[in-house]
Image (cartoon, rainbow, N blue to C red):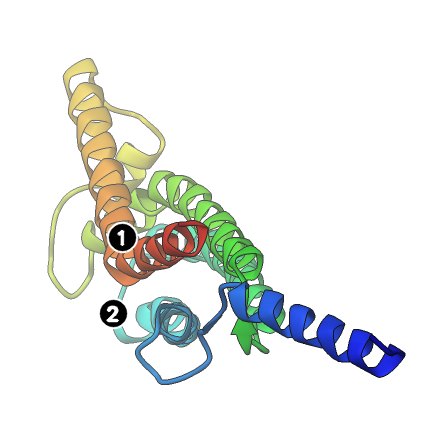
Amino acid sequence: MNFEDIKKEMNEEVNLEEAKTPTIDLNRGKNNPVEMIRSNMKKEIVTQLVCIVIFMSYPLVVDMLSLNEAVYYIFIFITSLMTIGYILKLGLFLKKTRNFATNTKETIQTFVFEAKLTLEVYKSFIIAGALLLPVPVFALLTANNSTGIVVDFERWFLLDISTLEMVFLLIGYLILAVLIYFITVGWVKLMYGKYLRNLEVVIEDLEA
């Protein structure tokens, strides 16, 4: 056997090994899990930015009392800063996963890990936001000049209330915070859960 035959045989073995290596093209079509996750994240960035604009401009439309408006702006501003941090995290994730061609199991695992890490940041943001949002919501709904609601927001905000009122305030605050949290977590599962599970199934198939 001469050198050319040996070289040819080695090339055939290399090609055979490459053919055995499981790969999947996740950059093909608009309905693959990777593209759907990325697409939903892009939509979420736009939605979050629109929400910030709406919430920040809402007191311009609704006639609020001075204290209500000040408290509302302070808490919404803090929440908006947190939201922008999450948007930047989403943007970094989209940038890192921009070029997704033919991928091996390891690449898909990395994508799933990064996606889950990004969503954990989102959940942390929601926990903090769920504790902040009840205050501006309460400021918005009480002592509104246009509605004529007589609830004294200043008295409640300064906790100048009875023990029974304090109990009702804490229970209502916690219920609203928990409700905001579970609604958002459910939204995350709806937007991303199915596609992450699909990718995990792909990884299991490639390992088989």
Quadrant the N terminus occupies: bottom right
Outermost right residue: 3
Residue occupied by mark 1 = 189
Q: Where is residue 195 in the image (x, y as percent from the top left)?
A: 32, 61
Gap in Å between the C-alphas at discs 2 and 1?
A: 34 Å
Figure check: 167 above or below 92: above
Crowd tier of the residue under label 1, counting other residues whose Cα lies within 10 Å: few below 14, some 14–19, many 20 or above: few
Q: Where is residue 123 in the image (x, y as percent from the top left)?
A: 40, 45
Q: In which quarter of the image is residue 58?
A: bottom left
At horizontal 18% and vertical 34% (from top left) the residue drawn is 175
Could you tell me which secondary element the residue under label 1 belongs to? helix
Q: Is residue 103 left or right of residue 47?
A: right
Q: Position of residue 104 (x, y in %)?
A: 54, 63
Crowd tier of the residue under label 2, counting other residues whose Cα lies within 10 Å: few below 14, some 14–19, many 20 or above: some
Q: In this view, does 182 lie to the left or right of 83?
A: left
Residue situated in front as seen by the camera: 180 or 185:
185
Outermost top residue: 163
User: At label 1, which amino acid type do we have?
Assistant: Lys
Figure check: 103 above or below 109: below
Residue occupied by mark 2 = 62
Residue situated in front as seen by the camera: 143 or 52:
52
Figure check: 198 above or below 33: above
Q: Quadrant of residue 203?
A: bottom left
At horizontal 31% and vertical 53% (from top left) the residue drawn is 197
Q: Position of residue 67 (x, y in %)?
A: 37, 50
- Decide which of tag 2 and tag 1 comes sooner along the chain: 2
User: At label 2, which amino acid type do we have?
Assistant: Val
At horizontal 20% and vertical 18% (from top left) the residue drawn is 162
Figure check: 184 above or below 14: above
Outermost front residue: 1
At horizontal 33% and vertical 50% (from top left) the residue drawn is 136
Could you tell me which secondary element the residue under label 2 belongs to? loop
